[in-house]
Image (cartoon, helix red, strand yellow):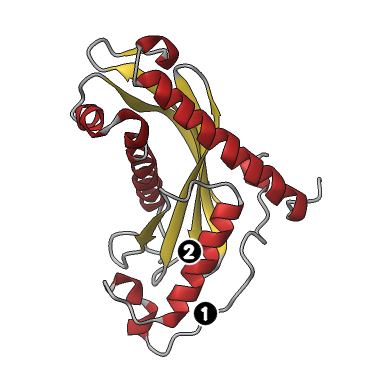
Amino acid sequence: MDPSKISQKSIPPQKPKFSSPLEASSYYHPTSPSSTYTSLRESAVQTAVNMGYDHSSLTECPVDWSADQDANQHVTNAAYARFISIANLRLFETFADALGNEKMRGMFAGKGVGPVTKGYDYQILRQAAYPDSMLVGTRIKDVKPDRYMYNTAVWSLQQQAMVAQCTGWVVFIDYSTQRPVNLLEKGEPYPSLHTFIKQKVEGGNAKSAEWEKTNPPKRKAQL
């Protein structure tokens, strides 16, 4: 599926109502009492999972009034890039299930083999602004012996809609040589990591295909 054609009906439309400005930014509170955000968050998470996005690495990023907005009070491109980067780092952290904690510590220290984002492209689909909190999810779409391709989506909890998306690819390299590594030929635990990623691909793609059947994307009229 072309991620640019994902239906904006991804999440059932709701109009959140808050009793005060403080409640509207209550996503910052560690034990937020706001039942409104709880329902918005649950709805967004369920939709992300149904669309095939990896549940274990879902990430919530609060919008900061001063750091994340431009002069027009819109969330900036740089903020979206940061949200997406955080979510993809959390996806990397799931690899510990295949690599083990020791290999993961080495990976984050730049030792042995690790993932490097080789390229990406992202689009802003809708304007978003403070107060809001973003749900960010990643789905690995395909995997090769030395790399994988992914799609990361950003949902606004306030709007209950996808507001940005990113497509890109990650290459596994040997940090000492800076050269790509064939995981299947490197020796354990790297073939197991490839299998782990492949399982994510198959599970995510199956859910994505099912979602497309019941939620066909809206297509704009051609000029």
Height in image: 2 above or below 146? below
**Label 1 residue SS:** loop
- Tell me: 184 left or right of 102: right
Q: Callout 2: helix, strand or loop? A: loop
Q: Residue at x 43, y 81 (%)?
A: 35
Residue denoted by label 1: 16
Total numbered labels placed on residues in the image = 2
**Pointer 2 with pointer 1, Cβ within 8 A:** no
Badge 2: how crowded within 10 Å, few (<14), some, or many (20+)? many
Tell me if mark 1 has few (under 14), some (14-19) or many (20+) residues whose alpha carbon lies within 10 angstroms of its own: some
Which quadrant of the figure has residue 146? top left
Residue at numbered disc 2: 128
User: Is 197 left, or right, of 27 in this rendering?
Assistant: right
The first of marks 2 and 1 along the sequence is 1
Q: Is residue 56 left or right of residue 125?
A: left
Which marked residue is nearer to the observer: mark 2 or mark 1? 1
